Amino acid sequence: MSFNFSNKINKVPPYLFAKIDAKKKEIVASGKRVFDFGVGDPDLPTWDIVIEKLKEYSSNIQYHQYPSYMGDIVFRETIAEYIKKRFNVNVLPEKNIIVLIGSKEGIAHFPFAFVNQGDIVFSPDPAYPVYRDGTYFAGGDIIKMPLLEKNNFLPDVEYFLKKHNPKIVWVNYPNNPIGVTAPDDFYKNLIELAHKYKFIIASDAAYIEIYENEKPRSIFEFDGAMDVAIEFHSFSKMFDMTGWRVGFAVGNETLIEGLGKIKKSIDSGSPTAIQMATKYGLENFISEMDNDNGFMQDMRRIYANRRKKIGSILDKFNIEPTPSHSTFYIWGKMLDGLNSEEKVAELIEKYQILLSPGTGFGESGEGYVRFSLTISDKDIDDLIQIIK
Ligand SMILES: Cc1ncc(COP(=O)(O)O)c(C=O)c1O
């Protein structure tokens, strides 16, 4: 018997990283070495103190039962402390915070709580594909807001508001795939528009702790945001724990409550041992936040160093890096007229370098490729030798 996927599933193009992964397997099978700048998955191990606590907590029988679906309250209290210390924003752990099974889970589920059939959602383009996919699964439609160099990679939200009445507007700074941050005026203006036109701002801040010098800001540092916004955070990139699946959302009480209602019906939360081990990491992070040394400071230096090294050879590929000091991505513009897919094919062919084509993140990514700096320093050094 054959079965047809639902129209909603058919609307979603193949997941970009599944294609990249298939290409990698093909090269490895042919016996060649791959320089994998494709998927943004840290090569560095999870913070060792988190792993130690995970070992200890996994044998605590108290943590073997169903987790709390909003997240363990003591973990949410520590998250509230982090929000206060890092952004100087007061939030209530019981009302303004929900723990997620990685921020992807929350991003995908959030539209189910607020989007009705046919509702419009604005997404940046290029963008993390889950804003689109979650919207489609909830029955909504996507309007893409191009992120262009001439606009400093900021969406012209006002332009699209003249034509559409969105339920949700997604923004993502520090941005994947471009690596840029948003200036204060962008957030202030967006919050004003959200009040005026009555839409929800969903801000994806998964990379807010991955920066070189200037700390990226939370939307909640700006007046009026708590009335209209929800912000998604991830421990995946902070503590190198993509495999453990834990993140959180913070924001307006009703928006958090809505997401909680969906999660209550769909999942049972991130495992408590993982939440509590992450809490231990977060407490340590809070206490070393102002120091020059520490787990995250070391990680930021590693990425900064890799950015510099890779940046120094890009002209050999006829690629110009977009200036950036946050995330672990380089958004490279092609200078030789090749399109994204052609450049990816060329670099696989010549050097077995695996990249993400800009168009994998949306049509406005044409003319660009994305390098993820989650590749070992040894690989980077060897590649530089080969190129030279
Ligand atoms: C922009 C962006 N948001 C969210 C996520 C999801 O991260 P996680 O689910 O691991 O927290 C990713 C992962 O790559 C991302 O790039």
Image: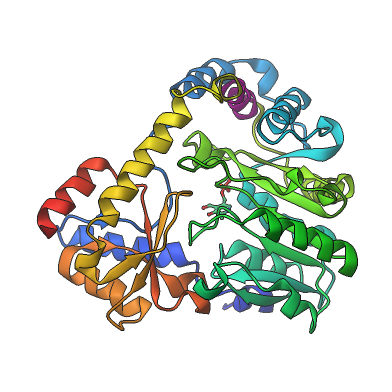
Query: What's the magenta bit mostly, secondary-structure-wise?
Result: helix
Residue at the (61%, 62%) spot, across then down: 130
Residue 93 in the image, given as x and y percentages of width and height: 81, 31
Q: Quadrant of the C terminus?
A: bottom left
Is 194 above or below relative to 139?
Answer: above
Of the pair 268 and 191, the residue shown nearer to us: 191
Q: In this view, does 128 lie to the left or right of 298?
A: right
Q: Is residue 359 left or right of residue 67?
A: left
Is 345 above or below relative to 296?
Answer: below
Q: Is residue 66 visible?
A: no
| In magenta stretch: residue 281 | yes
Q: In which quarter of the image is residue 284?
A: top right
Is 317 above or below relative to 96?
Answer: below
Q: Quadrant of residue 247?
A: top right
Q: Quadrant of the N terminus?
A: bottom right
Residue at the (73%, 79%) spot, across then down: 160
Q: Can residue 31 be seen in this view?
A: yes
| In magenta stretch: residue 71 | no
Question: Magenta residues, as a range?
Answer: 273-283
Of the pair 136 and 199, the residue shown nearer to us: 199
Is 27 above or below relative to 142?
Answer: above
Residue 349 in the image, given as x and y percentages of width and height: 19, 71
Of the pair 32 and 129, the residue shown nearer to us: 129
Residue at the (72%, 72%) spot, across then down: 157
Residue 376 in the image, given as x and y percentages of width and height: 28, 43
